[in-house]
Amino acid sequence: MSDTFFLNGKETPFKPGQMILDAARNGGIEIPTLCYLKGAAPTGACRVCCVEVKGARSLMASCSTPVTAGMEVFTDTELVHRSRKMIVEFMLASGRHNCLMCEANGNCRLQDLAYFYKITKLQFPEKEISDIYPTEDENPLIVRDFSRCILCGRCVQACNELVVNRAISQGYRGAESKIVTGGDLPYHESECVFCGQCVEVCPVGALTEKKAKGLGRPWEVTKIRTTCPYCGVGCQQWLHVKDGKIVKVTAVEDAEPNKGRLCVKGRFAYDFIYSEDRLKTPLIREKNGEFREASWDEALDLVATKFKEIIKKDGPDAIAGVSCARSINEDSYQMQKFFRAVIGTNNIDHCART
Amino acid sequence: MIILVGTNITEAHPVAGTFVKDAVLAGAKLIVIDPRRTEMADFAHMFIQLKVGSDVALINALMNVLISENLYDKKYVDSCTEGFEELKKKVMEYTPEKAAEISGIPADTIRELARTMASIKPAMLMYTLGITEHICGVNNVMSCANLQMLLGNVGVEFGGVNPQRGQNNVQGACDMGALPNVFPGYQQVANAEARAKFEKAWNVKSLPDKPGMMMPTMMKNLTTGKVKGFYVFGENLANTEPDIKQVEHELQSAEFLVCQDIFPTETTRFAHVILPAAAWSENDGTFASSERRVNRVRTASVPPGDAKPNWWIFKELAKRFGHEWASNSAQEIWDNEVSVLAPSMAGIKYARLENDGLQWPCPNADHPGTPTLHKGGKFTRGLGMLKAIDYIPPAEVPDKEYPFVLSTGRRLYHYHTRTQTGRSEGINDLLGEETADISVQDAMANGIADGEMILVKSRRGEVKVKARVTRQVPEGLVWMAFHFREACANWLTNPVYDPVTQTAEYKACAVRIDRLT
């Protein structure tokens, strides 16, 4: 009977040390979770993954209970579902989970569970508004809406165990509990480096991207995979695009090399492309030093004419060019091809050396 | 074990930094070698706060200990490398005591560091511009390679000498041959066979055989008249190059300057023609990351106004010289030209890049790519070359008039000259101005308060900037970035270069700091 257990009556293999949740998922049984975060130590904080284990005094949190050989686990009993539903009902009463006004509407695990359990009205009295911590809206990038926080702790785990920025932790006690920075300061006055990993892992609408607010619901956007335009790590991003405009950027989970992580620039510094400052038309400098707008034909003809003159007078080596280490490979290829094959010089370089 | 040398990884490559921190939490040993007490020093088992520019002396002394105490990987050195005897002779001159004088690291700490390095295998060495941006940048890199070969750490997974590339596609721009000496895939322009291949592919009678000028030479020659036409694609040279005053004089001297960019910049002011380009996410293409991974970039938006993809602009220009280029998209350029002409990328086609990309060398369509180079200690040139290297100090060292070392780099929230991050909402709110970072000791000695405006002056220029008093910076050092025009460090930096690569010494020049009141 080594390395198998019984999952809803079916003999199922497991690896020593594996938690019930992982072993069950491997065995094809989905168990809902809220606090579980891959890659971090399980906390069993939300209890929504509870299962029945034969012989146990109470329901067990499957994310943090290791499987033992011969263990009999039941994931689909009336007791399990009644408990999960009640947990969700408690959470719904713990704050203001009004989906219509929530940025996470359509991308919320709590909403999914409330829907699954066909919850139509609150079973418990809602927490008084005066007992809810006010929303932090003053930092430039991340909205912290404590009325939607279910204290699952995923953000704390992501911050401390995945990206190890150690900016937030569980604060206060009991009904006063709150996710806090050091000294309970707003993000921008704390150790937070705005990588936004907390937002990435928040299962509800407690942490959302400020810049994305109101720009598109999850079902309205198309997700396009791309590579970050900042440093040389090459993080993989999802661009959330609505009507041809990026409304939000998230990380591609399980992708190499970033495995679902981004930094402040990758996550939040995407909207420069929509700046009004963008160059929109070719410009030619007049004799008086002012630039005037020109057509592509005029501008390109001028460049070609000038370069031809220089080549004729001083030879191709009197022209030099630097390519762009920000732009795509194909652009650099074209530029060096233009310099070598068309101008006839190897005076082509870029900023790698400086 | 991970060895970080001259890399402020949590700010310059934050996501890579998270994985290093994860490794430490999981039990890996971490050694951090840097003049500044970077965030990573808090995670390090040994933090070696060496003096700016003393890397070669320190590494030579480490190798001195490894050899003297017989701690190096003799088997690896014997079978996979050459040049050991010359290296040994040289490093024997660098006793820990001698290196201690140069680097400021006590001799016993150097011994302990060498022993620690020899105690764990494999060890991965990562460096960034703290190694390269010196007049001895090439020597610094070769010293890192010497050390790692001596430890038997090259050609193994989780080992190697790993530069963290600064820009998203600096690797790719090199791979594509935007360099004066090589065609795409690092095929030498001086090689007749390579030229013949490209002449045929590009349908031209002949291609130039002499390597061209490197960028600093190009710019210098704008003032001599040797270079008359200058084409700047997506670079803001007027802020990024050392000694802005001189750089602007050079740009001003161009007979004909073409700038191709997405924004007006300090550089485009000097242009005769400005060509508006499509930006990231406005066309399809590929980037190559630090780990030689070719990844897809995809279109999400349309370019504004008349802005066009850069590849299209070059194609249109070529047409005006009678060259008709067939490829009409980035994919056609890659699939039909790059991968056909560069053997190391022959197996990389767009159809294979849908998920996590491919790491070159990837020589054929079935090849899975190459995450680790020099596997099994087999080097491209055969044996790994150990090279005897001498320490040389930075070109400009502190003196009575300019008693501080200025070192420069990048901060977390901004990227280079802020053309992009400065126009992304919210980022300026997180970091809105430049500071000169100085030590607590120097602040006290000079009566400078945190946040006070001071004057930082070098032989080339001066800037008024806010002082940031921080324990990150040791006594005698001033540290600044080049994100903000007014207080850009490059008004001060020294335009001296590594003789081989012409990489500028951004990491060391002499300055003085004065209170304004």
Image (spheres, rainbow, N blue to C red):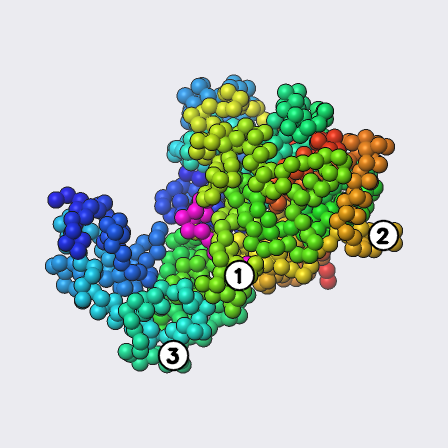
Pair 1/3: label in front: 1
Magenta part of the chain: A246-259
From the viewer's side, name the closer residue of B388 and A160: A160
1 or 3: tag closer to the N-terminus = 3
Dot 2 alpha-carbon crowd within 10 angstroms: few under 14, some 14 to 19, many 20 or more: few
Type of residue at label 3? Asp
- Residue that badge 2 annotates: A286
- Residue that badge 1 annotates: A242
Q: Position of residue A234 (x, y in %)?
A: 51, 45
The relative height of residue B485 versus residue A124 in the rendered view (above or below) is above
Answer with the quarter of the image where residue B210 lies: top right
Q: Are marks 1 and 3 on the same chain?
A: yes
Type of residue at label 1? Lys
Residue drawn at x 49%, y 36% is B359
CA distance for labels 2 and 1? 40 Å
From the viewer's side, name the closer residue of B478 and B497: B497
Mark 1 and 3 residues: CB-CB less than 8 Å, in contact? no
Mark 2 and 1 residues: CB-CB less than 8 Å, in contact? no
- Residue that badge 3 annotates: A131
Q: Are marks 2 and 1 on the same chain?
A: yes
CA distance for labels 3 and 2? 66 Å
Tag shown at residue B93: none
